[in-house]
Image: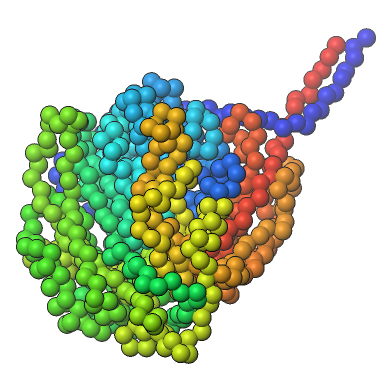
Amino acid sequence: MRKNILQIGIGFLLILGLVSVVVPSIGHAQPQPPTTPDQINSPEDDGGTAEIGVEWITDWPGTADDRANWYYSANNLYNELGGAGWIKRFNYGNTNAWEKDFKAAMYGGINDYVIDSVDLAMIGTHGSSAWDSRYGKTLSSVYFSSNHDDWHLSPGEAYRAFGNNDLEWLAFDSCSVLRDDSMYYWHETFDGLHLMLGFANTMYVVYPGDGGVWGDQMQQKGWWIFGHGAKTVTQAWFTAVEDQQPSGVRARVLAEALDNYNDYIWGQGYVSPDYPNNGAYWYWDHVSGTPEPLALTAVPTSLPIITINQRPVDQAYTAEVGRAFGLTGDVFQSGDGSVFVMVGGPNDNLQLRVDAASGGFFFQNLDELWTDPERPRSLPQSNREAAALVSNFLAQNDFLPGAFDFDPQIPPTIELEGPTDGLLLPATIAPTTPTTPTNYAVHYARTVDIGGGQRLSIVGPGSRQNVYVGDNGDIIAFKGGWRSLNLQPGMQIQASTAVTVPIKTATEAWEQFLADPTIALAQLPAADTYDTTGQPEPTLAYYEQPQVLNQNELIPVWIFQANLYVDDANAPGGQALVTENSKIYIPAAADPATLPKASITSPTTGAIVMPGETLDLAGAVTGGQGPYTFDWSAGIDGALGTGPTVNGVTLTPDLRASGLQPTTITLRVIDGNGAISTAEVTVIVMTPVYLPMLAQN
């Protein structure tokens, strides 16, 4: 007798995907940069396809190290280039972001099939320190949240691993990975890579992050509706840092050859060849500068509330700003109304962007600022001469918003910018290409008089007025447009009538930060120890948000400085330096309700989402100031929607690892002061598999 048994099993299939790629030969672009950008190149390394890949981590074990904004930085870059026609090759987040994706094959990595399978890649995560067995010392590292293969990527593990297949440009959106004691070793990872972009010191995880601005600024966007000119890869990186980062952040870009700094991304202009690694390299720094914040003369128990006068930012406002830079053309507005743009002519060499939220502006001469380092220039002979040229420009254009709101008692800080040659260790080869500095950067400070002989600095990404002097003493860029504050002449508060808010003591603020480092306004890298020994005494200041955000009031903050360390058994004393002299901006208001606090009411952590099931998301916020914006995202799926509730959400299972991984749902809330609060829950998203019919005799 034949017995038929029908077995239908519905289980949960755990898949480890295998990625197959064709390993291409190395291609070469045109040998000399054109005098003006054109669009004649194609990504030859892999047969003509431009590809983008990103990785990001927002969730580490525990909560103190979580940084939600790396998701936005990476995904905004991914979508910017994807929207421009680039192939979206991979977008790995949290436990799907693996150290072995960057590791050389000789060390068990799969670099050739992940990071080196695309033309441009970025990871947003903590920078750290770890013992590097190849070099026998502790060096900077890229820190991961899962053990594939381990928690830290050190430069020795990626020795000559980047660029031998396809990769031209790699960005570490991380603290201090390219710091002074480690950048030589990261250069030793080059094998056809053109540029490695990152930071020499502390960078801050701010919304919306560096990646989206970087991706946007590398593209030319059409003028018939709205747009701007394309920037080189380096120009765009420095622009993103200038826009997003608080003062003192040092962006750094490593290059194999000086010519690599002329690179545009594919389709936007010149792309340099794949130069061989000969042990010598170049690095180019840009500091998002303002002078140091003022020290306290006395410690107040309360601070005045400083309100912001909202400007009527429109086409007429933009045209008036443009007049200072000789722009007379049409004003374009973005489709969402957030930005106004003017340009200088058909070559797009002059560009002005004005943020509608604040009236802040950034003018750039794209032919001159942070570009073409091989061209000799006639720059001012000294810092003093550069500052005098800027003073004359301000006097002739005193109608510029906020032009004379700087503190005349604080001299501007001045930096001479341009690439610097790196050498072998020990130095046996030196680059021979001649170079001169490209420009001076002049940074001003703004303070406010709160009475009683006390002035406090205004700090934060929106607090800077930076003017750039280039060839023949021309003003080649201007980052400015300080928000208009409700103050008396001389940036003075009328103390007798001021509305004040009680503030924490410095000790209270520091203890709260140590208990929860995520309360800092601009978020720091992960650290096991924060050492304030030998640092300046904490001071009070007011924080101004990036100019792209709405802000109704300046935010009182305590500013601490500390060296940040992680535990490392191989380092002297058992701890390795992550970054030094890092500024920490801790909200100073005593009432916790002055800042928003987001929460997710549905779903709850641990919820299991069955195949085909949809979710309804619900969130809430307390504290802070309205109006609020709500933004939802999750793991593989990215953006889920906006608003306090989002219904009918379908989530994708997380299947990259050898077991089903939890999916993190994140709610980000921004209040009317630009203050941000995030909340997270983790759920398990199941996937079905229908087993085939089995017959048994």
Residue 582 at x, y percent in the picture: 38, 53
Q: Which residue is painted at 53% across and 38% down in the image?
A: 145
Return the residue nearer the eye: 177 or 241: 177
Task: Inspect this view and state whether residue 257 appears.
Answer: no
Residue 491 at x, y percent in the picture: 34, 83
Residue 98 at x, y percent in the picture: 49, 34
Return the residue nearer the eye: 526 or 285: 526
Q: Which residue is painted at 40% across and 73% down in the image?
A: 298
Would residue 403 be found to the left or right of residue 124 on screen?
Answer: left
Q: Which residue is painted at 62% across and 47% down in the image?
A: 664
Q: Could you tell me which quadrant the C terminus lies in?
A: top right
**Outermost residue toward the right in this view:** 1
**Outermost residue toward the front in this view:** 298
Would residue 294 be found to the left or right of residue 153 on screen?
Answer: left
Q: Could you tell me which quadrant the N terminus lies in?
A: top right
Question: What coloring was used for the rendering?
Answer: rainbow
